[in-house]
Amino acid sequence: MGVLDGKVVVVTGGGNGIGKECALLAGREGASVLVNDLGGGLKGEDTGSAGPAEQVAQEIRAAGGKAISNSDSVSDYDAVVAMMEQAKKEFGGLHAVINPAGILRDGMFHKMAPEDWKAVIDVHLHGAFNVTRATIEHFREQQDGSYVLFTSTSGLIGNIGQANYAAAKLGVMGLSRIIAMENAQKNVRSNIIAPFAWTRMIASIPVKDEASAARVERFQRSMRADQVAQVAVALAADGAKDTTGQIFAVRGNEVFLFNQPRPVRGMAKIEGWSPSSIIEHALPAMKANYTDVGASASVFPWDPV
């Protein structure tokens, strides 16, 4: 018996990395799986290939599971609608979407080309909208559904050189929260994961010195994609029915629950504020509660995600 017995799950980005491990594990846990992957390069600049998704689907079938493949882009809403219909037609239903599909086009913001901004937003943020909007009515009607979306500490905390990626991933946080709030009464859940795992995205980060090389070696050995998949599949299962609207991070065998933005300090002035009084009184009083902004704002020692 698996935690996803009888469920139908769509996994995007399922041809490599975290998506592949999520698809394989979902299959082992009893789900019928639609494996989606464009089959393109890391930057999403090529036309892609049906091969990676189909190879993973074949692996699931060879192990005794049920799987089909799809090679459309999550950035294309009509294609995503057709993808979800494909899963329902083939397997007779749909119960969860796990959505780690993504690309990277890193660069300092003052040098970032508009097309690099748009491409990353299209895949990560618009892609998250597409997979959720294409399925939300179905989930609400059957009063059963789970979204496992993917964020990043690049958005939650910050990472130099990833303004496009950070903006998209923080947008996914807001999207997931509202989906969870609006659909709690319909038993439709949405949670997000910030993953720490060795994937081709992480492998693309330049190694500039021996210290970085040692750091990367530790990362590759101890923080694997299959460890992230354990949490993603758990969140897709009925056993996690009381968990929604949450932010998780996975680092190796550690699972973290993130807090969410709330006020940390407030001040009032009976006669109202002016720019001068804010500068003279409010900002100095609040300064001790500012969130630090540094070259590396991470709360984790190994955090290139």
Image: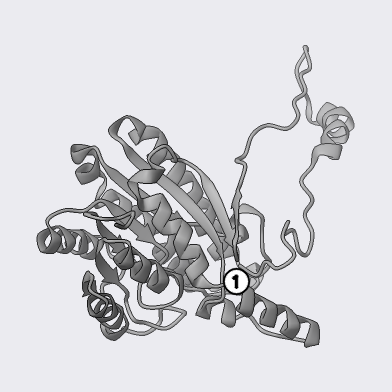
Q: Quadrant of residue 77?
A: bottom left
The image shows residue 170 at horizontal and vertical percentages of: 54, 52
Horizontally, residue 279 falls left or right of residue 74, namely: right
Indicate whether 23 appears above or below 243.
below
The answer to whether one can see residue 74 in this image is no
Horizontally, residue 111 falls left or right of residue 57, namely: right
At x 79%, y 42%, the residue is 290
The image shows residue 133 at horizontal and vertical percentages of: 28, 49
Would you name the residue on which mark 1 appears? 223
The answer to whether one can see residue 91 in this image is yes
Q: Quadrant of the C terminus?
A: bottom right
The image shows residue 119 at horizontal and vertical percentages of: 43, 70
At x 85%, y 34%, the residue is 279
At x 27%, y 75%, the residue is 60
Horizontally, residue 124 falls left or right of residue 209, namely: left
Q: How is the image coloured?
A: one colour
Q: Quadrant of residue 242?
A: top left
The image shows residue 13 at horizontal and vertical percentages of: 37, 71
Q: Quadrant of residue 263?
A: top right
Q: Quadrant of the N terminus?
A: bottom left
Count all numbered tags in the image, as a single digit: 1
Q: Secondary structure at mark 1?
A: loop
